Image (cartoon, rainbow, N blue to C red):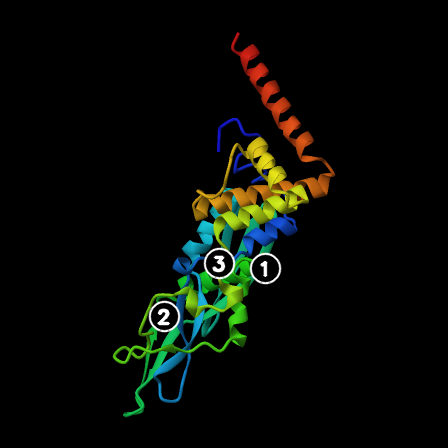
Amino acid sequence: MIQTSPFPFTFLQDLPGLWGPRTYTVASQQFDVTELQKRILQKTKDGTKAKPAFYIDPRTLDHRLNLMFGGAWSIGFSIDMGDKLLVARATLNINGIVREDVSSEPLMNIRKDYKTGEVTETVNEMATTAAQAAAYKRAAVKFGISAYLYDFKDEVIWLEVDPKWKSQFKDPSIKLADLPEFARPMPGPQIVMNELVYLCGTDDPVQLKETLQTYWGLDTVRNLDRDDSFRLAACIARVTDFLAITGKTISALAEDRVNAAKSSSSMGFQGGR
């Protein structure tokens, strides 16, 4: 993207309260298989196969929020200590819109030796970290982020269990073939083009290319990596939602940007005289 394009990737990133259907659509896009992790949810009777639960870690969630909103989001936590449980509340703020959720973890790890019947208790040193991470991800789901991962409960997927390490899968990696159609990530450039179609109100390739060149200084999106695709798609989505809220046209919005830049430049020049 050239420096003089009217709408940089960060455009409208920190506008308070800006959250519309197109922004939601980009935020709720599926994660790449390299960003997912999996754990055993349920085993077959013979223990050779298991049903997986797919999830993301907090750093992956941070990355999605940073791509889309830069510094215009924050996460805060509060902790409530009970007799047996630690309860964490996460407060996720994106552009002034707040969503909250909670998660709990036991304060003690209790293990029973089924041969001897002996019960041992140890302090759960990861209670705070685990509860905060789960609450954070649950709050993000209320913005649509990773919500699709909860739909796996209705899917019948069985993967081989490691014969030596019974608590792990034989293949720790995640492949597209492991995922049902609804969970397979859309290529980054396609996400961008989908948002461009919504912005333009047409799928005419000539108009789409002209809009991309005029307002983002790009001739094509084919060479964008996934991160830059998300940044651009999020920017286009914010512009679409902003225009829907204000009733402006994209050309008028771009003109406002140009005039504001000229005014700022003129004031800076006068101040330097």
- Above or below residue 59? Residue 239 is above
Q: Are marks 3 and 1 in contact (CB under 8 Å)?
A: no
**Residue on which the image places disc 1:** 142
Of 96 and 252, which appears nearest the observer? 252
Which of discs 3 and 1 lies nearer the camera? The answer is: 3
Of 55 and 248, which appears nearest the observer? 248
Of 95 and 46, which appears nearest the observer? 46
Say which residue appears at 53% left-offset and 56% top-offset. 29
- Above or below residue 23? Residue 87 is below
Give percent across and percent down for residue 218. Answer: 51, 35
Q: Quadrant of residue 199?
A: top right
Q: Quadrant of residue 91?
A: bottom right
Residue neighbourhood size for the residue with mark 2, other residues' Cα within 10 Å, grouped as few (<14), some (14–19), many (≥20): some
Q: Are marks 3 and 2 in contact (CB under 8 Å)?
A: no
Comes first in the chain, label 3 or label 2? 2
**Residue on which the image places disc 2:** 124
